[in-house]
Image (cartoon, rainbow, N blue to C red):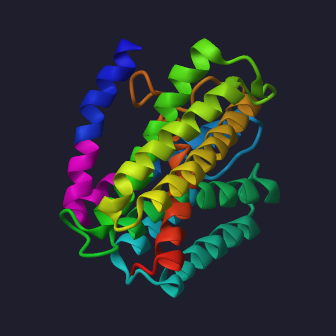
Amino acid sequence: MLVRILTGLVGIPLFLGLLYLGQWPLLALVAGMGLVAFYEYTRLGQAMGFRPSLAVGSLAVFAILLAAGLLPPTAPHLGAAVALSALAILTWTLARPVGYTPVDALITLAGVFYVGMLSHLLLLRRLGDGTGFDAGFAWVALAFFCTWGADTMAYFVGVPLGRHKLAPKISPQKSVEGLLGGVAGAAVVGMLWGPVAGIARWQGLLLGVAIALMATLGDLTESALKRAAGVKDAGHLLPGHGGILDRFDSSLFVLPFVYYVATLIFGLS
């Protein structure tokens, strides 16, 4: 637990600092995270008996993240990067390297789409000026603060009070009580941070509740992958936290959700 806390004390300020700077520093960070996360994903796939392509998949993830960070943040540009990545993987399937099957290609493609959700961190950060304390920073912070609030309260409520298992076949340690505590924690954070992001407190509260639920889905998804692979952690890069997928599994679901809420409902661009 102490190692986990110390990693957070170092990592969170560094992450927030790069988030504040935005632009190239943040793009470099997210690109690195994406490549490491896809490497972790391929290891999970291999442990399940598949052979996802690390080289092709990594290039596809890198292309999607670059598109999100550098091209005009519109659907056609990102859609083109995703489509071209999918075509590259399917073309690779036709070449059929020795030992690979079409199923391996589909597993690779699924991993690209899964890890590629990190692109929404860049898209969300580019709302506003893309640097400094602007709308983009406020909304990314909202996503992460609510996620962290949910994670923290789920732990402190779930450990002493957890009696009813939430998903025993996927993650035996998670409880309904912990989920409710996480929802409450994220709701409070959303209510407090909402005005900073330019929305009403009640809207921040509701968004916090939704973020907590999306974070739980993201967490359970990665837990299901790890259980199928028979491993405890996807990686070991972050002491006390595991790998990038272990630390940002919730965010892979939260960031796209918050981005589309910000753009489609609140009209940010």
Picture quarter with the C terminus? bottom left
Is residue 208 placed above or below 269 in the rendered structure? Answer: above
- Number of on-image labels: 0
* Towards the viewer: 253 or 69: 253
Extreme-bottom residue of the structure: 76
* Residue 260 horizontal side relative to residue 191, left or right: right
Res 225 → quadrant: top right
Q: Residue at x 50, y 46 (%)?
A: 187
Q: Position of residue 182 (x, y in %)?
A: 55, 35
Q: Residue at x 61, y 37 (%)?
A: 43
* Residue 99 horizontal side relative to residue 64, left or right: right
Q: Residue at x 75, y 59 (%)?
A: 106
Q: Position of residue 199 (x, y in %)?
A: 40, 66
**Which residue range is magenta in the image?**
14-33
Residue 24 is covered by the magenta coloring: yes
* Towards the viewer: 39 or 255: 255
Is residue 182 placed above or below 108 in the rendered structure? Answer: above
* Residue 110 horizontal side relative to residue 252, left or right: right
* Towards the viewer: 159 or 71: 159
Q: Residue at x 55, y 51 (%)?
A: 211
* Towards the viewer: 150 or 12: 150
Is residue 73 placed above or below 115 in the rendered structure? Answer: below
Residue 58 is at least partly visible in this image:
no
Res 157 → quadrant: top right
Residue 68 is covered by the magenta coloring: no
Residue 172 is at least partly visible in this image:
yes
Is residue 155 placed above or below 51 in the rendered structure? Answer: above
Main SS of the magenta part reads: helix
